[in-house]
Amino acid sequence: MTKVTAQLSVSLDGFYTGPRDARRPKDMSGWMQGPEAPGFFRVTRWVVNAMAWRERLGFAGGEKSVNSEIIEETFAAAGAYVMGRRMFDAGEVPWGEEPPFHAPVFVVTHRQRDVLERQGGTSFTFVTEGFERAVELARDAAGGKDVQVAGGGELVRQVLTAGLLDQLELHIAPVLLGDGQRLFDPSLGLGADDGIELIPTRVVETPEVTHIRYTVTGRSKLLLDDRGASGDLVEPAQPEQ
């Protein structure tokens, strides 16, 4: 059965890139020289060093490791991808003529563009009807495999908040960035007594990164854990009507 999944590398304090350049927040042409890139490349260092990632981009070298096996597994599970326009704009040139996806990619955008066909089975379709429509198109194109929300973090939050995400995998790098773009922030729209519950289903530890996979069970109300002498959980009294 097709699942909608997402996986992102983050710092221990929850950032997936450095701060966005306030002067040119949508201009990706100078992204490598801006404040986002150093944090991004630190939390994804484990990817760049992995043999599976380097092979996917047509490069030599890299380490054959548990991290590399997880990258192979992630690519093998995905039948289609959804990504945000900023991620596409940042990656279009570096990915080259044969991007690493080897599957249909649906780009959520406000700017229309014709379908971009690349070598190796990758195509980029630009969807202007919103992320829900992009996920729907990706499901149809995935051939029974998973739909992977490739990023960035804003898109992952939107899909999660909409209740469309089935699985989330975090790759936690052992670094504190102190500032940057947080994966989880108030845009989740959760109230003081709301939460989105997740169940950890796999933890893989390496010196470079800790991989934690979660099944997303959805939004729920939070209870005050006010246990009396009996040890029973006492739910808060409901106000009289």
Image (cartoon, rainbow, N blue to C red):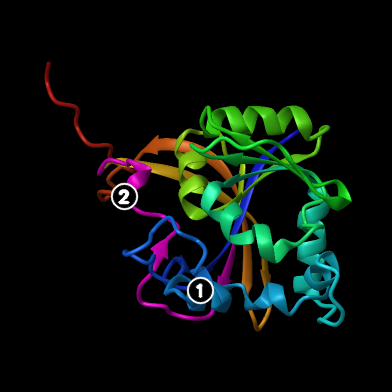
Task: Check disc 1 and report its element: helix, strand or loop.
Answer: helix
Graded by Cα atoms within 10 Å as few (under 14), some (14 to 19) or many (20 or more), the crowding at tag 1 reads: some
Q: Amino acid at mark 1?
A: Ala
- Tell me, yes or no, whether the highlighted magenta stretch contains residue 185: yes
Q: Is residue 169 visible?
A: no
Which residue has dot 2 on it?
A: 186
The image shows residue 200, relative to residue 69, as above or below, that is: above
- Region in magenta: 169-192
* Residue 46: quadrant of the picture: bottom right
The image shows residue 99, relative to residue 125, as above or below, that is: below
Task: Check disc 2 and report its element: helix, strand or loop.
Answer: helix
Does residue 96 appear left or right of residue 21 in this picture? right
- Tell me, yes or no, whether the highlighted magenta stretch contains residue 109: no
User: How far separated are the C-alphas under marks 1 and 2?
Assistant: 23 Å
In percent of width and height, residue 2 lies at 74, 34
Nearest to N terminus: mark 1 or mark 2: 1
Identify the residue shown where x is 43% and y is 55%: 26
Identify the residue shown where x is 57% and y is 52%: 151
Quarter of the image that includes the C terminus: top left
Identify the residue shown where x is 56% and y is 43%: 216
In percent of width and height, residue 178 lies at 36, 77
Q: Nearer the viewer, residue 30 or 174?
A: 30
Does residue 128 appear left or right of residue 75 in this picture? left
In percent of width and height, residue 106 lies at 66, 39
Which residue has dot 1 on it?
A: 37
Q: Is residue 50 visible?
A: yes
Quarter of the image that includes the N terminus: top right
Graded by Cα atoms within 10 Å as few (under 14), some (14 to 19) or many (20 or more), the crowding at tag 2 reads: few
Q: Amino acid at mark 2?
A: Pro
The image shows residue 140, relative to residue 87, as above or below, that is: above
Q: Nearer the viewer, residue 48 or 112?
A: 112
Does residue 153 appear left or right of residue 138 in this picture? left
